[in-house]
Image (cartoon, rainbow, N blue to C red):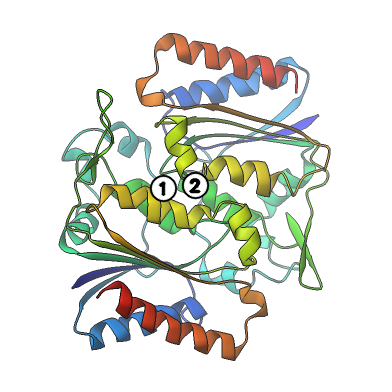
Amino acid sequence: MRVLLVYAHPCEESFAAAVRDRALASLSAAGHEVRLRDLYAEDFDPVLSAQDRRLYHTPDENERGVADHLADLRWCEALLFVYPTWWYGHPAILKGWLDRVWVPHATFRMPKDGKPIGRVLTNIRRIGAISLLGSPRWWWWLVGAPGRRILLTGLRVLCAPGCRTLWLAHHEMDASTPATRARFLDQASNRLARWLR
Amino acid sequence: MRVLVLYAHPDPESFGAALHRATVSALQGAGHAVDDCDLYAEEFDPVLPLAERRGYHDPASNRAPVARHVDRLMAAEALVLVYPVWNFGFPAILKGYLDRVFLPGVSFRLDEGRVRPNLRHLKALAAVTTYGGPRWRAALLGDPPRRLVGRVLRGLVHPRAAYRYLALYDMNRRSAADRATFLARVEHTLGAL
């Protein structure tokens, strides 16, 4: 399967980088074709400008500046995010990737005359996220698991019907140990394999 | 009161800009001193860089790169956010304000691994916002920005702080009259904060 991995963390020595590398290794070993978008490494600008905002609803013109990202979205069959959860959501650089790349016409059709949002990226049959959180699991759910729902519910309705989701989270990272992290990496490999079956 | 207004919309001709102007004028009209922080106009960089991530957990030095924003937040007695909801969340420029300015030792403290609120000096918290889609669609996702403000940020401010979440849903289908009604509601509510 063709997999687009969108990654957001500034530090190469972080556990997020280890998760990214494990994911890349497992996916390649299983014969999947992978493209990596490392948003920090490519210095992605997450700020939707006034000009972007004015052209937001104009077909084609709203793709300028993010055409290569849209090409990756049209290419992939599985979309995987690897990132730390900061303030219950995505790092700003990833939030801005959603704001700037997921534009109307190219990624969805606006709801009209009572009809719901129209799917465009029906090539995407898998959507998943692996995230690292400081908060305990119970508090994350009490806050409504916002980062998870934005991706796995919000984006999912724009992809293929029946799109299969994956969510894997390491909570309470500040109390993590080499053992919990090693277990988590193994879990990531196993879950990725099941998700892409 | 000293009120810090955090505003995030790029387009000065937008309804968001009108909400921002109404917010500031209503607060000033009620006698408050407004520190108007327009994140786009100030060209705030929302991306937490490598050095700040590495120094994140050191309260003695982590605020240095954003000291001016920390000072403004600490000098405020009330916080008002004005933003459009994009993709069920804050615009990246405002999300990054949380990432970079709401640091350990600033918005919260860690006492033996437990998170303690540290914005108790804020006696009021409000959000003024618009959603493109209808309320039921936001509710399907748990309305992330409403919970982020109403549960997370509200948990950091004074326990008896006044709290208002003023939201106009379904913006894509609203009439001029609906928008005018909402503007009036914002002026009235913030004028009485």
**Separation of residues labelled 1 and 2 (CA atoms):** 6 Å
Residue at the extreme top: B177
Tag 1 and tag 2 share a subunit: no
Q: Which mark is residue B93?
A: 2
Q: Position of residue B183 (x, y in %)?
A: 55, 16
Residue in the image at 29% along x and 50% along y: A101
In the foreground, B102 or B168: B168
Residue in the image at 17% along x and 57% along y: A123
Q: Position of residue A122 (x, y in %)?
A: 18, 53
Query: Which image quarter holds the N terminus of chain A?
Result: bottom left
Residue in the image at 59% along x and 74% along y: B54
Residue in the image at 39% along x and 55% along y: A151
The reply to whether residue B106 is in sight is: no
Q: Residues within 10 Å of mark 1 (few under 14, many from 20)?
A: many
Query: Which image quarter holds the C terminus of chain A?
Result: bottom left
Q: Three-letter amino acid code at disc 1?
A: Val
Q: Residues within 10 Å of mark 2 (few under 14, many from 20)?
A: many
Q: Is residue A186 left or right of residue A195?
A: right
Q: Quadrant of residue A19?
A: bottom left
Q: Three-letter amino acid code at disc 2?
A: Ile
Q: Position of residue B94 (x, y in %)?
A: 53, 45
Residue position for label 1: A47
The reply to whether residue B131 is in sight is: yes
Q: Quadrant of residue A138?
A: bottom right
In the foreground, A158 or B5: A158
